């Protein structure tokens, strides 16, 4: 061995110093790409699950709006039917027994009204020799298993009030 040689230094034959394979800065960064990758995957998963929830809520809102519109149309049809019974075309006298409930014929079997029920009430009041009638039409439309406890039921109610006088 040579007496003047530094024992801690790496000297190559060409006289230049060789670099170690990993310097101290790179050793600290080892695995950071894995952590960043896991973070990005987690964020993407959270965004995807939030988007799925938004889409499910939008689907429920569309269903509620469709069934609500159907119930409103059934309630309006019930009110029309009650007015036709109250004021028939043959010019007979209008009659409405206080708080009577009328059946709307064939509403549940008509196209567009499947799953709907309509209940009608009529209240008559005499005020200054004029008969005043208040007709309340309440429609309930439902789909799914509404008789059981499965939680798979959609039920919508709409109510329409009509006042008339003769």
Image (spheres, rainbow, N blue to C red):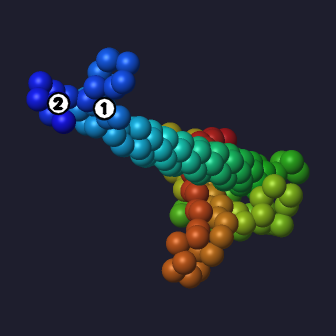
Residue occupying the point 83% across, 66% down: 109
> Would residue 85 appear left or right of 111 to someone viewing this image?
left
* Location of mark 1 (residue): 20
Task: Please tell me the numbered disc located at residue 2.
Answer: 2
**Residue at 41% across / 38% down in the picture?**
33
Looking at the image, which is closer to me, 118 or 44? 44
Q: Secondary structure at mark 1?
A: loop
| Distance from Cα at disc 1 to Cα at disc 2 | 23 Å
The image's mark for residue 161 is: none
Residue 110 falls in image quadrant:
bottom right
The one of 53 and 102 positioned closer to us in this rendering: 53
Residue 166 image position (x, y, % from top left): 66, 41
Tag 1 near tag 2, CB within 8 Å = no
User: Which comes before the other along the chain, label 1 or label 2?
Assistant: 2
The residue depicted at 26 percent of the width and 29 percent of the height is: 10
Q: Is residue 86 visible?
A: no
- In percent of width and height, residue 64 lies at 60, 50
Vertical comparison of 6 with 96: above or below: above
Q: Nearer the viewer, residue 128 or 1?
A: 1
């Amino acid at each position: 061995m040579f007496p003047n040689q530094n024992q801690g230094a790496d000297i190559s034959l060409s006289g230049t110093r060789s670099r170690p394979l990993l310097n101290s800065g790179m050793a600290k960064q080892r695995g950071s790409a894995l952590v960043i990758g896991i973070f990005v995957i987690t964020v993407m998963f959270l965004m995807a699950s939030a988007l799925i929830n938004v889409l499910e809520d939008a689907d429920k809102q569309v269903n509620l709006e469709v069934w609500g519109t159907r119930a409103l149309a059934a309630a309006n049809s019930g009110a029309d039917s009650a007015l036709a019974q109250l004021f028939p075309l043959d010019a007979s006298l209008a009659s409405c027994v206080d708080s009577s409930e009328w059946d709307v014929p064939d509403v549940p079997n008509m196209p567009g009204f499947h799953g709907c029920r309509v209940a009608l009430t009529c209240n008559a009041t005499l005020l200054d020799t004029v008969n005043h009638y208040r007709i309340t039409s309440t429609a309930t439309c439902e789909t799914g298993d509404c008789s059981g406890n499965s939680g798979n039921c959609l039920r919508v109610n709409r109510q329409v009030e009509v006042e008339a006088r003769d």
